[in-house]
Structures are given as C-alpha cells and as structure tokens.
Amino acid sequence: MRNTMKVARWEIKRNLKNKTFIFSLFLTPALMVVFGILGSLSGGGAEDETQAMKIYVNDGLGVFESLEETADRYHLPLRLFRTDVKEADVGKELAKREKAAFLFADERAFSEGVLPLYTGDDFPDAAISQIQMLTEPVKFLQLQRLGLTDEQLAVVTKPISVQPMRADEGAQSPERNKDGGEAAAMKKAVPGIFAGVILLCIIFSGMMIFQSASQEKKDKIAEILLSSVTPNELMQGKIVGYFVLGLIQVAVFIAFGISFVLWKTDFPLFRYLFVPELLLFLLIAVLGYLLFAALFVGIGATMSDISTAGNFQGLVIMLPFIPLFFIGPVSADPSGTLAQVLTYVPFTSPVILLLRLVLLDEWRWMEIVLSLAVLAASVWLFMKLAGKIFKTGILLYGKNATPKEIWKWIRA
Amino acid sequence: MDVYLSVEGLEKTFKDKKVLHHISFEVRKGEIMAILGPNGAGKSTTIRNIMGIQYPDAGKIVFHGHGGNGIPRHKIGYLPEERGLYKNAKVMDILLYLADLKDYPVKKAKERALAYLKKFDLEGKEQMKMEELSKGMAQKVQFISAILHEPELLILDEPFSGLDPVSQELFKEEIRNLAKQGTAILLSSHQMNLVEEICDRLFMIQRGQKVIYGTLDEVKTEYANFKCTIRGNNDASRLERIPDVQRVEQKEDVSVLYLTKSVNPARWLKNLPEDLDIRELAMDRISLHEIFLDVATDRRMLLAEEKEKLQEAGEIDA
C-alpha cells in the first residue's frame, strides 16, 4: 500500500510539473469561460434592450410591492417605477421616454377586468405577454377582497397545468409535483451534470493512465521500477494517481464553472448541488472511472505507442465512448428497453445509468442496485485481468502484444 | 566471505524451449561475481528470475540473512539490460523517486545523488530533463539510480554495453569500490576483457547450461592453458609434432601453438627445435576472451566431446 501511494504521488507530481498537463488543465475551462463571455456579450445586447423596459405604475390599489415581487419571481426583464402621471398626460410622457410603458392599477381591474397599459412605439410587443404575469397579485387581491381564507386562496391561486404522463407510471405518482416540478428536476439535473463532468474528466485522465503505462514500456523503465515494487503496486499506484489528477481537473473545471455561474447568473447552484442524490451519482462516476482505468492500464501495458495500436487495442480504447452514441435514444425514452439493457452492460452502464437517473422522475431501486452490482463486479473482474496483462505486458519492451498473447497471459 | 545469495538448480522453460538447465551459483559479500556468456545464453533470464520479475519452473533462490523468504527488494540495486528512465522528468526527481521506492531517506539520497553526479562528471545537471542528456550521461544516471540507496546486493546486467572507454573505467572503478565496501555484486557481460579485470569469480553459461564456474584464478589454471605465439616461417605440420602441442593456428607468418594443460613452460621452451624460424615469440595464457569464444562457438565443447570419444575408444581398445 505504501508503495502504491509512492507511485501515485510520483505520477501526480510528474504531471503537475509537466507544462502540457498544466496547459490542458486550464485550457478547456478557460475556453468554456471565454465562449461563455462571448455568448453573453452578443446575447447581452438583447438583454440590455429588454432591461431598458421601464414600467411606470400608477398604483391605485396598493399592489406595487407585490408587482415588483412577481416581476422578480418570474425573472421578468422589467423595471418598475411608481408614478403619479395621469392617463391624460401619458402621451406627452411617453414621447419623452424610450421603451417605457405606463400601467394603471386601479378599480377598473375588478370592475372591467383590465389593467390599462400605454406603450410607446418602440415598445416590443413580445414584452406585453410578459407583463401579463403582473396580473397575478391583482387577481390575488381580488380574491382576498371576496373574503377567502388563506387556505382557500392557496387552492384557488395554484395553477393547473396539463402534465404528460406514461401509462405504466400511472396513478402511483400523484405527489410528484409537491415541491414544484422544476425544482425537483433541478435537484437531479444539477448533481447529475456535476457527476457527468467528474466522470468525463476522470475518463480522460484514465486515458492518461494508458499513456503512462505505454510510456514506461517504451522508455524501458518498467523493469527498474519492478525491482522495487510489485506489478500490482505499480498498477494500483497509477490508478490512484490518475484518479487524483482527474479530481484536480474536476476541481479546476468546477471552480471555473461555479464562479462563472455565480458571477453571471443568480442561479441557486449550491441548493441544487448538495442533495443526497449527489452521493449516488458520485459513486457511479467513481465506479465508472475504476472500470475504465483498469481497462486502460491493462491495454496500455500491451503496446508501446498509441500510433501503433492494432485493431484490437483500438477497439478497447473506443469502449468508453460507446455510450455517447446512445445518449440520444436513451434521452428520448429513458425507461425503454434499450435504456434498460444498456444499464446492465458494464461499459455503458455508468453514463447511461447517470443519464437515466437524471431524466427519470421515479427511480427504480432494483434497477439501480442491480446495475451498481454489475458495475462493481466488472470493476473487480477487469482489475484482475488488467493485473495479469500488466504484469507480463509492461516488460515486453518494443513489442505490441497480439490478442492471442493477451489471452495467454490472462489464462496463465 | 559470507554468502549473500544462493541460486540452486534453477530451471526455466519458455514455450517448449528450455532456457535454463539446473543453474546453481552463489554470490558472496564483497566479491564481484560475473555471469558470462554469448547473447541468448540465459544471463538475463537468470537475473530476472533472481529479481522476481520472472518465476523459475524449479529451483531455489535464497537471500541469506533475510529470513530466506521473499526478495529483500530494498537491499538490492538493479540495473537491467534493457533500461531507460522517464524522458521528460528531471534527473534529481527521478533519482529521488527511485530511492524513495527503496525506502531510502530523501535527504541522504539527495546528498549522495549530488556527490555521485559530481563524481561522474554530471555536476549541475540535476535539474536537466533526461531527454536533454546524451546517451552516455543517461547511462551514468541509470547507474547512479542503481547504487544510490547503498544496496547490499548489486545486480548489473550488461553494465558496460554502449559505454565509451572513459565511462567504462569509471564504472569499473566504482564497482570495485563498492565491492571493497562489502557489497555483493553480480554482473553479467559478454565483454570478457572488462570482466577479466574486475571479477573475482565467474560463471560461464551457454545455452542455459553451466560451462565453467569458479574463481578467476581457478578458471585460468583449469581452462586457460599456455599458448605460444611465434612469428616466422614455419610449417604447421612440423609445429604440431612438437611435444605438448594440442593444436596450431596459422595466419600468414604468425603461428599460435596451443599447449596442453600439464606443460611446464620453461622446460618446453628449452626443448624447442633449434632450427625453428623465430622472429618473435610470446608465451602467455589463453585469455578469458578466447575461452569465451571457444564456448560461444562450441569449439571447446566439441573438443571435449571428441576427447571423451577418444578416451572411450581407448578404453574399449584396452
């Protein structure tokens, strides 16, 4: 174990001192941020346009605060101001202002059911539908005046919407909307995306294990190392080391991502991120990493250079990317047969399981447990196989192993 | 001298080819023991089996004073035949990492590394990357990495291959020093002249079989018969008729007379025919190199077989 940690430390140190690694560590997130900023710059113009929409409210009902609250709650691109301007003077006032509107909240709302809105010529029509949302507190006030209790109010004001359902999910999920569909989805999507990023990062660092193993073979270092440590210690050290390097990559990614999200939006990221589901997602990501790490370290030991990879090795290297082809079909039908089958296939299960857990509202624990069991068993199996291949392959300098030879080592 | 390592009856088969036949020898503290043999004789296989990088089919490898079980990896320094170091890492980082894998204290390792780099004319190169070093420099760093942690047993597989004469001298001297300090040293080589100068005992191997095993002196007395080199025009058949001459090799006007083991050189010289054409004459023993060539080309084995056959025939006649 001590030797494993020594090897791991060395791999980490060696990479952190390597300019290429440091460069690529920051390049991807930096690019993301740059594109994010570019995007927000070009999109920013539009935002400014809408932000400039000023609504002057002549408040005859005492609802101004509620109106502001509503605008906030729905992120409406409006700025509300109180005004005393009379309807007769509106024409003059509008002429003086750009993208402005005057809203008159008075008894007409209850008697005629209208809130008169005067707009200038340059006022975007699309914004009018958004301003429509401002009727909510007025409606509330109306009901209050009718003498409804708070409970009655809550029932009456709760919107009713059409909800697409699946026949087989049926009646057992009436409480799904309890805390609002959007929030529940976020609670899964945010940690899901987080775990996805982790999985992706550590799969990439898993590819570096492959590099590291074949490099040691190419540079003929393996025999010197094996005079001090056992092949298993060397292999495990690499797996642990690149796991940490993957986490460092994740940390950089997340640090960039989180600060970007917090800076550019007021999305309550942490509330959605730190939920119990995150633990399960992380477990899936870690198991996925271990599976691919075993695969890469084993296959890396069979060849001295990626450019000389035979068909067999090329095929194995492609394995982690297979689930990407299925993301489309599985997203379209997350509980379909294809999705279910792929959940139990070792090489697709981490990504597909993660994807399904994010998309599905109802988790079937049997499937999750079974899939995790398959994943754990294959991790164990592939670690064993990789150990056997690594032990022989890493010393076979200057030669790529054929599938036949690899099979022989496995059986030995 | 205390025995540090015993190899007993090592056998190894690759596929259906037997590459080691009952190999047995010992390495003692403070001595330089050489495994000699042509390419493919089984030297590296023997060493890899000792290092636990390969496993023998039969036989025992015992490290004395370590409970007999397992390989005391931290006490062994190993320089494999096929060797290299991380190309894009710094010299000092690699040396410290390899010493750390041997559980050698970092501070001491650093001091020793600097001292050795200076000794090997690599002062100030510790922060350079391996890929920036020349091949000879890289080999020196590899050598340092094998001895940095003060091993009790040093195993060097072809330590001199690819070295220039200056570096060869440097390595030889350091190997001698280490032996003097009590390190048990096992080295393999096919460069006889170098080995002859430094080794105390040798084990000659051919096709996985022991050919010769003993101290350098024993081997020389046993196998390195006297030979007499004469420059002058002489008829080969006439030279062969001189008593105690086993065989004659002639190239132009130089004749080499290989003498029997029991010959008394002084008496033999005195009894040389007076009418021989002698412009130059040299008397010396066959070098290890020649023994080795004999072994490598199987000449000695063939001779021995012929001798046996002759003896058998003689016995039958008698």
Image (cartoon, rainbow, N blue to C red):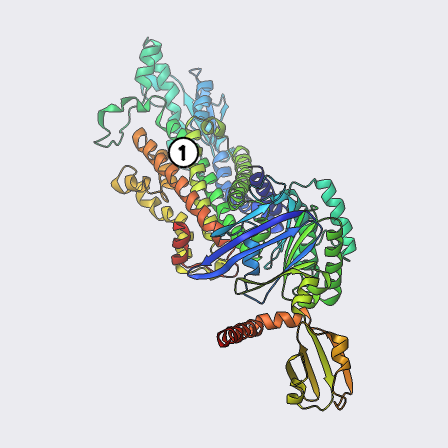
Residue name at image x 38 percent, y 47 percent:
A324
- x then y, percent, for residue A362: 31, 29
Is residue A327 in view?
A: yes
Q: Foreground residue, A195 or A189?
A: A195
For label 1, the SS is helix
Query: In terms of depth relative to the viewer, which is nearer, A119 or B12?
Result: B12
Which of the 4 quarters of the picture holds residue A116?
A: top left
Residue at position x 24%, y 29% in the image? A169
Q: Is residue A66 above or below residue B17?
A: above
Q: Residue at x 32, y 39 (%)?
A: A343
Measured along the vertical axis of the image, is residue A406 above or below residue B283? Answer: above
Give the x, y percent position of residue A245: 55, 42
Residue B258 in picture, x, y percent from top left: 66, 78
Parent chain of label 1: A
**Residue B43 placement (x, y as % from top left):** 57, 60
Q: Is residue B268 above or below residue A144?
A: below
Question: Badge 1 is on which residue?
Answer: A189
Is A236 on the left-hand or right-hand side of A314? right
Residue type indicated by callout 1: Ala
In-image side of A53 versus B140 (left or right)? left
Looking at the image, residue A377 lies above or below residue A137: below
What residue occupies the far left of the structure in this picture? A167
